Amino acid sequence: MKNIDSSINLLKILVVDDSPNTLEVISRNLAEYHYKTFTVNSVADAIAVLKNTDISIIITDYKMPKHNGMELLEYANGNHPKIETIMVTGYATIDSAIEAVRKGVHEYITKPFTNEELITAVKNAELRIQERLLVNSSASSNQKNFWGMIGHSSKMQVLFQSIKKATILNATVLITGESGTGKELVARATHYGGPRSASPFVPINCAGIPENLFESELFGHVRGAFTGATESRLGFFQTADGGTIFLDEIGELPLPMQAKLLRVLQEKEVYMLGQKKAQKVDVRVIAATNKDLKTLVDQKQFREDLYYRLNVITIEIPPLRERKDDILILSKYFIDKYSKEMGKTSPLLSDDALVLIKNYSWPGNVRELENTIQKCLIMDEDEIITSKDLPSYMKVSRGWDFADLQKTLIEVETEYIRKVLDSVNDNKSKAANILGIDRKTLREKIQKQQLH
């Protein structure tokens, strides 16, 4: 047995092959990348190593005397299921490849192979080990966050830097991003990280206010201003005086109200409904949208002057599919969060669940991921979350199969709408935003396609 030691890489790789030359080539190539390797020429010797050494990766030949590599993999899968496996063979056939996959082989390379092919297979195995450790370790639950936001990816680091710059200024901020990306978290970070942090932060969902109540809700009203106004009441702008008002879904603001909001931004004063005297307000405005406001401007659905007044500082939030490095970290965070709320031990994620979670496109972004994890914890009492616990639509191949091509357009649309509704916990406004349609159209489709 030959041992190549290095303190640089802690992974231990067991190489099994009856050819001394092959063992020498593989071990020498791995040594160049500072991997610690153990080399043996039989399955029996390999099992002896596995019983006494903490091996991370097995690289084994397929055909060997007495016992072959497939038998070694059966032993490893039954007794050391976390070990990554790489099959090497000079007798590659479709049948042997299928059998290897069924036995749990993670990588399959054929002789003669290049050094690049070998190292790529090992690096892929190393990545899977790191992801498994990341999402199933206690350390990952203590991830540092930036004002409630978690992310190590380069795009999130750019986002955090943009927020830091916005906090030291007093200019209007426009936050853009798809539904479920966390626009309110960014708005809160911008407020609480700045000099107005001790003053109110008032969030407003523009899509949730009836059009005839907008002016009263935003600017307040005096007694007798309209039928039912039995007393005077301050609006959101007066409530936020000295602090920040967050206008979420600003694209839903009716055109008449856009003109009045523009005046508030320009003059720093509001008129209560039914009152002729203006009131000065010191409010920082942060707006957010998942729509392309410039397109709405071109379509005459949003005022151009208001667009430029809002778009002084722009903060764009990347969708979750563009920061895949954060998906597993967020998954672990939500697992621990909801397990603690439910008074249960945090379950682990199986390898097949890890693959599905990382490769899924997450159209509902972080909100959909959080909702999916929460549902898994509610519905399943096991100590491990597997692919069986995840929604069926996550398991559909990214390519089209024959069954997909037999579906009608209405069937495909129905499945997708149901999927989006599930991702946002049946919130019709959020689902309509993701689908790019208005709520009326969505309601009609739900009724027509019986999506209840």
Image (cartoon, rainbow, N blue to C red):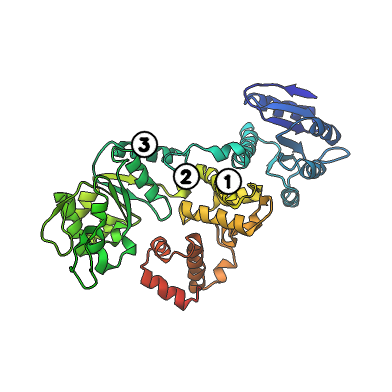
Contact between labelled residues 3 and 2, with CB atoms less than 8 Å apart:
no
The relative height of residue 84 versus residue 231 in the rendered view (above or below) is above
Between circles 1 and 2, the one closer to the viewer is 1
Q: Nearer the viewer, residue 179 or 196?
A: 196
Q: Nearer the viewer, residue 333 or 97?
A: 333
Q: Which residue is at a point 29% across and 37% down the rendered structure image?
A: 195
CA gap between label 2 and label 3 equals 16 Å
Residue 161: mark in rendering: 3
Residue 336: mark in rendering: 1
Percent x, y of residue 204: 32, 56
User: Which of the two discs, 1 and 3, labels the residue nearer the N terminus?
Assistant: 3
Farthest residue in the right direction? Answer: 66
CA gap between label 1 and label 2 equals 21 Å
Between circles 2 and 3, the one closer to the viewer is 3
Disc 2 residue type?
Arg
* Residue 285 in view here: yes
Residue 197: mark in rendering: none
Q: Which residue is at a point 79% across and 34% down the rendered structure image?
A: 50
Contact between labelled residues 3 and 1, with CB atoms less than 8 Å apart:
no
Dividing the picture into quadrants, the one containing residue 233 is: bottom left
User: Which of the two discs, 2 and 3, labels the residue nearer the N terminus?
Assistant: 3
Q: Secondary structure at mark 1?
A: helix
Disc 1 residue type?
Asp
Percent x, y of residue 441: 38, 72
Percent x, y of residue 269: 16, 52
Which residue is denoted by mark 2 in the rendering?
323
State the quadrant of the N terminus: top right
